[in-house]
Amino acid sequence: MAETSFFDKVYEVARQIPYGRVTSYGAIARALGSTGSSRMVGWAMNASGLKDVPAHRVVNRVGLLTGKHHFEGTNLMQQLLESEGIKVKDNKIVDFEKYFWDPMNELEL
């Protein structure tokens, strides 16, 4: 049986982020036991092709939409978040703590 790649593990976690919630690159890395691999999680989100991975729900540690330039159009990431009831102002999630979903607390990995 083939070993699951790091990117696949990232996608598995990202697919479980609930509608209307967000998490951070670092939170996913910590949940996978790879503290310090936030940038690699970002690369995974970029490589996901947005297929069945809700990459728009993954932001940086303070709620900035740092991955927005990887989405088509100028504001697609923001529009997707706002369609889920998350307010964004100046490329940052308003009340980030309210919407933050921590996979360490929510998942059994």
Image (tube, grey):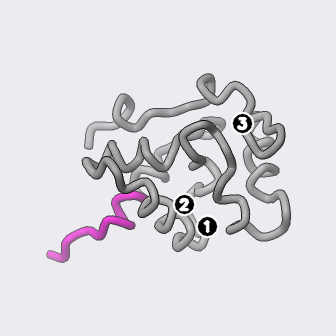
Mark 2, Cα crowd under 10 Å, few <14 / some 14-19 / many 20+, is some
Residue located at (68% from left, 68% from top): 70
Give the image location of residue 43, x and y in percent: 49, 67
- Residue 9's label in the rendered image is none
Q: Which residue was labeled with disc 2?
A: 53
Mark 2 or mark 3, which is nearer to you? 3
Identified by mark 1, the residue type is Leu
Badge 2 amino acid: Val
> Which range of residues does the magenta coloring cover?
1-10
Q: Secondary structure at mark 3?
A: strand
Q: Quadrant of residue 97?
A: top right
Q: Position of residue 24 (x, y in %)?
A: 51, 44
Dot 3 amino acid type: Ile
Residue 65: percent from left, percent from top: 69, 50
Task: For the residues labelled 2 and 1, say whether their Cβ atoms are less than 8 Å apart.
Answer: yes
Q: Residue at x 83, y 38 (%)?
A: 89
Q: Does residue 93 appear left or right of residue 45 in this picture?
A: right
List the single residue furthest toward the front.
Answer: 36
Q: CA separation, marks 2 and 3?
A: 20 Å
Q: CA distance from mark 3 to mark 1?
A: 20 Å
- For disc 3, the marked residue is 93
